[in-house]
Every structure is written in structure tokens, then in C-alpha cells.
């Protein structure tokens, strides 16, 4: 799916697929923890699985290209990252695990 990406500020990126849905992510590094806030207009985070409902779902969290968690809330914390640079990705999914084709990837460096 063709994507349009525009950087709106240093720690926030807007990605929109042709469907018109957008994913906004803010992140803040404090020590070894990454505090993440997500906003998806007209979207409800849900932990119900199975039935595909447009505008509902969850995110897969990847740290260094490995899936580490399923996220069912708009705000969460990645705790205890080791020193060094890490790649973090969030991918928005329907309740039936099909993709919305919205993904955000960025790097953080823990000192």
C-alpha cells in the first residue's frame, strides 16, 4: 500500500495509507525506559480477538526486529533496554491480525 510519511517534529511521525487512517506516535527516553503515546484518529484499541471490525485492533511491538509484545492501549512503557542503539517498531493490526498497513519505526539510544 503506498504510504505518505511526513515528519512533524523530531519525535513524532505521521504515516497515512491510502485508506486515510493515520498513526501518530510520540516517544520519550528516560534512562533505560521508553515512554510511548500513540494516537490513531477514529480507532479503538481492543484486546478482543477474532472478528475483524474496522477501526478496532491492537499493535505489535518490535524491538530490534523481534516481536516483543502485543499492545492493546494507546500509551505504554518499554522497560529496561540495554545500553546501545535499539530499533523500535509499531504495526497497527485488526482484531483478526490482518494489517492496516500502518507502521512506525524509529531508533533510540540508551546511554
Image (tube, rainbow, N blue to C red):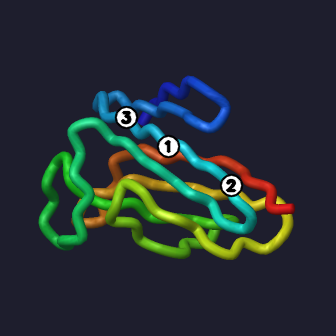
What residue do we see at 45% from left, 38% from top? 24
Give left or right: position of 94 versus 76: left
Q: State if disc 2 and disc 3 touch (CB < 8 Å).
A: no
Secondary structure under tag 3 reads strand
On screen, 9 above or below 76? above
- Per the image, the residue denoted by label 2 is 29
Residue drawn where x is 80% and y is 56% of the image: 109
Are dots 3 and 1 in contact, CB under 8 Å?
no
Residue 101: percent from left, percent from top: 40, 45
The answer to which quarter of the image holds residue 83 is bottom right
Label 1, residues with CA under 10 Å away: few <14, some 14-19, many ≥20: some
In the image, residue 46 lies at what x, y percent? 23, 63
| Element assignment for label 2 | strand
Tag 1 residue:
25
Viewer-nearest residue: 62 or 1: 62
Q: Which residue is mark 3?
A: 22
Please indicate whether residue 25 sits to the left or right of residue 105 in the image: left
Count residues near mark 2 (Cα–Cα under 10 Å), then give few for <14, some for 14-19, many for 20+: some
Q: Nearer the viewer, residue 23 or 10?
A: 10
Amino acid at each position: 500500500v503506498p504510504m505518505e510519511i511526513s515528519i512533524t517534529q523530531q519525535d513524532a511521525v505521521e504515516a497515512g495509507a491510502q485508506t486515510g487512517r493515520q498513526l501518530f506516535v510520540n516517544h520519550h527516553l528516560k534512562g533505560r525506559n521508553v515512554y510511548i503515546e500513540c494516537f490513531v484518529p477514529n480507532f479503538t484499541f481492543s484486546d478482543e480477538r477474532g472478528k475483524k471490525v474496522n477501526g478496532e485492533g491492537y499493535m505489535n511491538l518490535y524491538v530490534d526486529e523481534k516481536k516483543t509484545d502485543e499492545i492493546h492501549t494507546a500509551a505504554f512503557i518499554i522497560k529496561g533496554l540495554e545500553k546501545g542503539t535499539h530499533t523500535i517498531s509499531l504495526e497497527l493490526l485488526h482484531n483478526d491480525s490482518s494489517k492496516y498497513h500502518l507502521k512506525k519505526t524509529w531508533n533510540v539510544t540508551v546511554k
